[in-house]
Image: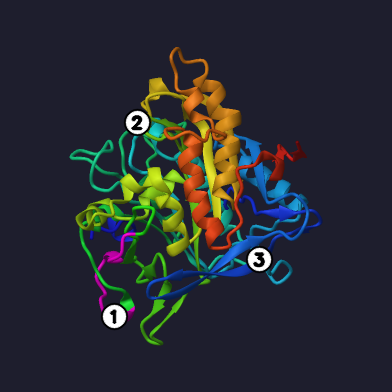
Amino acid sequence: MKKTGIAAGAVLLALVVIGAGCADQQRRVAAGVPNGNIQQNVPWTPGGDIVSAVFVEDSDGTDDGVARLVRSMQNHGLNFHQTQASPSGLIAPGDVVILKINAQWDQRGGTNTDLIRAVIREILDHPDGFAGEIIVADNGQAQFGSAPGGGGSLDFARNNAVDQSQSVMTVIRYFQAMNYRVTGVLWDEFTRTRVQEFSAGDMRDGFVMEDVVHPTGIAVSYPKFTTEFGTHVSFREGIWNPAAGTYNSDSLKVINMPVLKSHFLLQVTAAVKNYMGVPSDMLTRTIGGRAHDSVFTGGMGTLMVHTRLPTLNITDMIWVAPDRGPRADFHMAVQVNKIAASTDAFALDYWTTRHVLMPEAAQVPGGRAPAMNPAGTEPGTFGHWMRLSMDELHRAGIPATMNPAEMLIVQNGIVR
């Protein structure tokens, strides 16, 4: 594996599902998988009509938008940083944090690198000091995409940023130059390699894949790798300690960072669809459970339940592509200058699509705005396949909503 980092050269602290007068509590949900039960931290809100909260802030990525968002959430009972005073905060000082970005496309198709930089800065500025590790990662599946030969890249020449030469690797090298433990891993590089877990004695980088195809059509798979700092990461199981022979699941956090765009097949790609960068499409199609095909039938929900839920979802809406996505060349994008976040990917996708992407798509002659409707229930609409995935979370006892009456919306610090 070609690792990025020292040898080679937060967060939009967002939101948690909060309930009336009782925010930021968490419960443990056991998500059953064939080889055992994986315990996951899942936000919980008791009582009331509110299931999920969405925080929205104006930002171009280079300003203090992330900091303003953090303050807004704190004012509503959510702490991003886990401290002695705020033990239920999202990110602890020693956590390993995966920023799961979109690195499959260049120009406006990939996650804004100014925003990535701001999120990393917020993690590092932990009030108790950050002694963990930040991993910026994606799997472009070694197919499609803007990279030569297909797939993703962390070092595109043309990037979604004010300074278009600022690639993901440029951001990573900036922090590494100050001796921070920030690295990048492009999962494309081993997406064809099937491996076993660390606990089975397999120390290779690759993808662990189940042999079963779930009713939603997906064979669950996930990356397992070692970073340049020697950290052994299993996306599902957590951080492997070879000396103790155990995993620490709680110390691995995932911040899901999509860019809001149209999609020529799925109508919209945002937080839920961004999880398509977790499995191996190459491996799963060999046993009839191709991950990409399963998006239409609820596979992303199955994947979340049987691997690891995002600790936080942060949607990049600085530039959005209302038509002809998921590729989004510079001339195809519209500058909106907004960011939004939630622990509930479904509530987040509902609000951002309905209130940001659809109005822009409606201005495109012959555009796909009607099919983008998250309230849609007919096959072929965005809302239809999203609900199939959300049903998978509900079956596992995990709260999520696409009902606007069950959402708390806080925009620029004001409840809407």
Q: Amino acid at mark 2?
A: Arg
Q: Earlier in the sequence, mark 2 or mark 3?
A: 3
Residues 284 and 171: in front is: 284
In the rendering, at what x and y percent does residue 242 appear?
36, 82
Residue 349 at what x, y percent from top left?
54, 40
Residue on which the image places disc 2: 327
| Magenta stretch: dominant secondary structure | loop
**What's the residue at 32%, 51% (across, down)?**
291
Precedes in sequence: disc 1 or disc 3: 3
Asked whether, in this view, residue 399 is left or right of residue 290, the answer is right
The picture quadrant where one finds residue 106 is top left
Q: Secondary structure at mark 3?
A: strand
Nearer to me, 405 or 169: 405
Give whichever of 377, 235 is nearer the camera: 377
Q: Which residue is mark 3?
A: 26
Q: CA distance from mark 2 to mark 3?
A: 37 Å
Q: Is residue 307 visible?
A: no
Residue 353 appears in the picture as rendered:
yes
